[in-house]
Amino acid sequence: MSDIIFKLTGGVHPPQNKHQSTQRPIAAAGIPNTLVIPMSQHLGPPSKPIVAVGDRVLKGQCIGATDTLKSAFVHASTSGTVVAIEERPHNHASGLPALSVVIESDGRDEWQLMPAIKDWHLADRDTLLQRIHEAGVIGMGGAGFPAASKLSTDKNIHTLVMNGAECEPYITADQMLMTERAEEIILSCELLMHLLGAEKTLFGIEDNKPEAIAAVNAALIERGNDNIKVIVVPTVYPSGGSKQLIQILTGKEVPSPGHSSDLGIIMQNVATAVAAYRAIALGEASISRITTLSGDAIGEPQNIEVLIGTPLSQLLEQCQWQPARADRIVIGGPMMGYTITDTSLPVIKTTNCLLVPTREELPPPPPAQACIRCGLCAEACPVSLLPQQLYWFSRAGEHDKLQDHNLFDCIECGACSYSCPSNIPLVQYYRASKAEIRQAQADTEKAEHAKQRFEARQARLQRLEEEKVAQRAARAAAAKKRAEEAATASAKKDEVDPIQAAIERAKSKRAGGNTAATNESVNQVTKLEKRLTAAKIKLASAETVDSDKVPVLQEAVDKLTQQLAEAKANPVTTSHDAAVDPVQAAIERAKAKRAGNAAPASPADEIAKLEKRLASAIQKRDMARDSMPDKLEAFESAVATLEEKLAAAKAKAGE
Amino acid sequence: MIEFITANPLLAALFALVGLSLIFGAVLGFASERFKTEGDPITDQICDLLPQTQCGQCGYPGCRPYAEAIAEGERINRCPPGGEATIQALANLLDTEVLPLDEDVGEEKPKSVAVIREDECIGCTKCIQACPVDAILGSAKHMHTVIASECTGCDLCVEPCPVDCIDMVEIPVTLKNWHWQNPAKANDIIATDGGQA
Amino acid sequence: MALLNVTSPHAHGPLSTATVMQLVLLATVPGIAALVWIFGAGVLVNLAISAAVSLACEAAILKVRGRPVGFYLKDYSALVTAILLGIALPPYAPWWVVAIGACFAIGVAKQLYGGLGYNPFNPAMAAYVVLLISLPVQMTQWGAPFSNPAMGLGDALASNLFGSVDAVTSATPLDALKQGIGEAGQTFGSLGGFGWEWINLAFLAGGLYLLWRGIFTWHAPISMLIALAVMAFLFPNEAQGRIHSVLFHLFSGATMFGAFFIITDPVSSATTPRGKIVFGALIGVLIYAIRHWGNYPDAVAFAVMLLNLAAPFIDQYTQPRTFGHRGARS
């Protein structure tokens, strides 16, 4: 092919080390006894398990579902029984656990296929996308981006780029896939082109894989599709980065910020494309992948087709690893992979390589020396950043400058660290700084949000206070008016001693003890009526100014109306003032006491404080025993908690 | 007149300098009026740097009052929730020295949220009244609960609870919020790494 | 064996700081050989004194600063500084001149600024400038080309240490041109400055080797040489004419040594590709300006020091365009 190849910016040439694992054909890993299938193998929110412990599941049956394209479905990789749904150590750089479905296989490996869409070239886009989504296909090159999400772009796509570059040293999973299953790859290209409405496919393969290139070309000639072009690209790391391969094949730079779809290009890794094809044409969910095992501590380096959820230890044993010689276990390649220390972790959809080097092969990083600003990192950087500047800014925590220098365009390929003569772990600084900046942004947002809520609350409290004052004033005015009226009226009437009248009123009140409840319920009704009127007025005024509070106020009015109706229906309401009062008093006392020792400094103070609190809690409880037996339990548990805390504090002080 | 001045070097210098200062003074004065910028009042800028937990640990009733106090000259190291990062940011803004966190006001603690042990809650609404950001839901005599995403971790609700059913729980590291850490300093022998000399 | 838990990348490239420094040392060999051929063994004595004092000074200061001495000595950076300084100093300069230079280069220009990676000035050039300003007599007594080769190592040592053997000295061609002394034939050799053309060619060879090994990029040296040539072409020496003027300046004095061994010092020069071009070009212009219109015969050290100061500024305004971004950052 005489296609123009464009040059990659920067790049490094680490030793390829691909030959070790290409000597043997792809082998099958057996069915393990137990599979641990994590619910978060992809980028995006984890899926939710939809099976229960004890369920029998079939190979390819969905066990984790999601309702968003940003996430991915998860399936059982073999038939068996669900024995646990719990947090299990996850195959992730953090080593943190993730919710996983644990399946005990029955060894029968019974499939449950989705209906195959044989005539996919007639099927519409949505059907195909839905199937790819439901089959749990995610980017198998390492990032784990859900394929359906990427393919569902609303941009006009003219070119599909197939990524067969596989630029990381050691990894040969895609290479072996292309060599052994080229026809399937060509078919998956056609499928994806149909799905995207793309006119052509540019198939990029690095020139260090002649067998793969030959196989794909042969399949292409047999298939006779002129719209798919294999383009052999020079071997340079990181040619397999999506933006980098697009640059090499088309000479165009994916804009930043932006996606390749802005250029009308979508890229898929070959393994992902095949997974999508199998999901559609055969109805198979994404339940296995090809993984490379390589490194000097692996006795028989090779590629293995393995079920998702298989423990790494099984693969390592199958390939005759020598634990004594193994210095580290890298998931992925030597440039971007992460290390793990637990071989019981499961293989997940993004596990493209297990690299087990010896100490001589990949020596541990020596201590970092001073940066001599040699600029080798800047030469190596595929996105033309200034790594040494970023390094200084990162060490100084200058987030603004890091962002000015486009830290977030860093693809973390590791080319800078690889070439740094002073062994500075540059990429690690960038990763940490990126996280810090994101954290700081989240914190700022949260602070802003908290401020708004705080201010809203302050405004509300102030408004309530003002309303109260206004009401009090109104009441006072009304009372005055009434008094004046009464005065004039009484002046007109016969002279009645006001004192006498007051005494009379008091007497009648005292005498009418039995009428107190009625009075109160009457009061209650009056109160509610008043509140209802006020609420209605507010609602009316809010409606006139078209405030967004209308629904809330409407609700309040409805509620008050209802309450009023209730109050009218059962006039005898229980007054809970009596019940609240002791609590109120206890709180006040406790507060006063606590105010006395606000800042506990030493353990002794802490203990003293706790003892006081305990005493008051006991007091409260005793009081509660008489006045409100229904709350006794709560107070008792408070006492118990405090006793525990006290004991803990004492133990701590005793240390 | 001119001749008299030119004949007298001392006077010439004097006049020249006075003249220059008058001209420049006028230009500067004009510029300061003409190009006056209505920037953010300093209090707002300070307030934006504070973590808005409204916890009052600084001794002021909320972040804005503390910001106002800082603008008036209060020390910048009285905000435990903000910790070193906030002190650094404030020092940058105000161009002052970075101070260590004032020990009297508390210490920097890991981020946490309030959690109500709901079966012990008696529904007294005390915590609801204490929460500065309305992050607690509930009504009288009914169980309360904390909206974790709104909680700022100020722990103002812990004290008022009469039955001690509120705990401050550290936000755990999960797959969702995990991130890479900076390389360990021990691995980093360079000339200005400090502390060694 | 416990499995390592480290971050990527796990592979590392072949270059280390020590390797870089060793390659630089290796590349100075042809130049040193030419110097010895033309000026005699005094050059070697210079280098030996400079290296010994520099290493001792570096070790002592590291010790005082509480740094791991072995760790830092192993990066060879002190030795490189020492050799570059030794080359720059006149052969048969008194031993104490060399020693003061080495102490200043390592003690002040390097370690006081924080050690390797933190020095704003090229240490060798800083020391050279200090010596040139403080000791103008000793610093301008260059041996006359081809006059002292008969002097053995012993005599050279004696000359340096005790001044007991008188070496034949003369003004350098650049000096001669400046002063208007000497015959045309004495000043201009077959290609450049008499005798100096061979030294320059040797350093050019060493520099091209480093370029080939990828130790530095072409930007700074080439732009400096082009700028110098252009200046010499535009403002030629009256005595020499345009073409000869260009050749003379390219192949006299410290031109090639400066272009490939001094301005390529990564620590104190600009780092962005465009920045390096600007950096080199300005040095070339300055070298010619000082040589032609200034008071000093050679000017590489001054030009480099001035531009060292401007390097951060140049970097700031020559940042490359990040992948996928429209314009360059500013």
Image (tube, coloured by chain):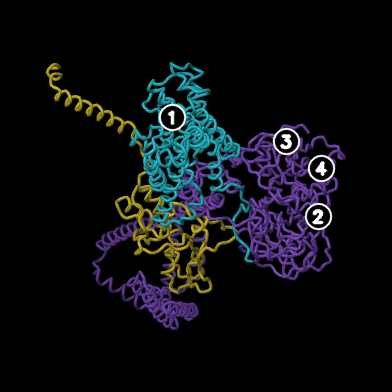
**Callout 2 amino acid:** Ile
Which residue is tagged 1?
A: C144
Badge 4 and badge 2 in a common chain: yes
**Callout 3 amino acid:** His
Badge 2 and badge 1 in a common chain: no
Which of the two marks, 4 or 3, is nearer to us in this view? 4
Q: Rate crowding at label 1 as few (under 14), some (14 to 19) or many (20 or more) other CA atoms within 10 Å.
A: some
What number is the disc on residue A26? 2
Residue C20 x, y percent position in the rendering? 55, 44
Looking at the figure, which quarter contains the N terminus of chain C? bottom right
Question: Which chain does the purple colour mark?
Answer: A
Q: Rate crowding at label 3 as few (under 14), some (14 to 19) or many (20 or more) other CA atoms within 10 Å.
A: some
Q: At 22% across and 29% down in the image, what residue appears?
A: B21
Which residue is tagged 4?
A: A216
Q: A278 or A548: nearer the eye? A: A278
Report in which chain the residue with disc 4 lies: A
Question: In the image, is residue A591 above or below residue C324?
Answer: below
Residue A484 x, y percent position in the rendering? 27, 59
Question: Which chain does the yellow colour mark?
Answer: B
Report in which chain the residue with disc 1 lies: C
> Alpha-carbon distance for marks 4 and 2?
17 Å
Which residue is tagged 3?
A: A158
Looking at the rendered structure, the secondary structure element under dot 1 is: loop
- Identify the mark nearer the N-term, 4 or 3: 3
**Callout 4 amino acid:** Val
Give residue A160's quadrant in the image: top right
Residue C250 x, y percent position in the rendering? 50, 26
